[in-house]
Structure formats: structure tokens, C-alpha cells
Amino acid sequence: MTDQVALIVRLRVKPSSKVLLEERLKEVFEVMQYEDTFLIATLHEDIEDPEQLLVYEVWQETRESFLTNQMSKSYRSTFEQAIVDLKVERTAQWLKPIAVWK
């Protein structure tokens, strides 16, 4: 398999902050989609717990190269500040493919 990483990020947000967080996420995705190693990203809302969002991203990179190459991008700073300002709980999970079906 080639270097590829999937990133799952769970976000818990207060109802009063949810719209603003979604706006910040969409702003990041609008720019991020043009990165050379970007493959796909999806923003999900938990059906039973709407204050929980899930971001699913797939990159043609390793975890290490992603952290070095992508997290340092200036367009991410507004989103990272929103995480702090809105007191969002965030957990991340890193996955690598071991088999693929199409």
C-alpha cells in the first residue's frame, strides 16, 4: 500500500457554538480540498447526539508528513483558535489502510 492516512476527529460542541464551529470547519475544508495530497473529507453530525460532530479525512501522506506539512498551514490557524475559543472537546484517531475494495 502507498502512504495514506485516514484521520477521524470527534468534536463535542455546546449547542450555542455549533453553527460557528461548522462555519470554521467549512472554511478550512474549502481551502484544504486543493492541497496536493488531499483525497477526501466529510463532516458528519451524530443523529442521536447533534452536539457531536465527526470529521473524516483521507490524505496521501503518512501521519508524520501530515503533521509536518498540513498542520503548519496558515489557513488552519482560525480553526485551531476556534477550537480553543469555543471550548470544543476534540479527540483524533489515525488510521492506515491494510486492505482496499472498490
Image (cartoon, rainbow, N blue to C red):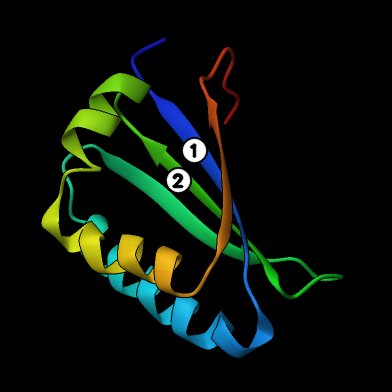
Q: Amino acid at mark 1?
A: Leu
In front of the other: 82 or 67: 82
Q: Are marks 1 and 2 in contact (CB under 8 Å)?
A: yes
In the displayed structure, 25 sits above or below 3; it is: below
Determine the image quadrant of residue 71. Answer: top left
The residue positioned 20% from the left and 30% from the top of the image is 68
Determine the image quadrant of residue 62. Answer: top left
What element does badge 2 sit on?
A: strand
Q: Is residue 42 visible?
A: yes
Q: Position of residue 73 (x, y in %)?
A: 15, 50
Q: Residues within 10 Å of mark 2 (few under 14, many from 20)?
A: some
In front of the other: 47 or 17: 17
Q: Position of residue 45 (x, y in %)?
A: 67, 69
* 75 with respect to 60 (left or right): left
Q: Position of residue 41 (x, y in %)?
A: 44, 53
The residue positioned 17% from the left and 34% from the top of the image is 69
On residue 57, which mark appears?
Answer: 2
For mark 1, what is the residue? 7
Q: Position of residue 52 (x, y in %)?
A: 70, 65
* 34 with respect to 26 (left or right): left
In the displayed structure, 50 sits above or below 37; it is: below
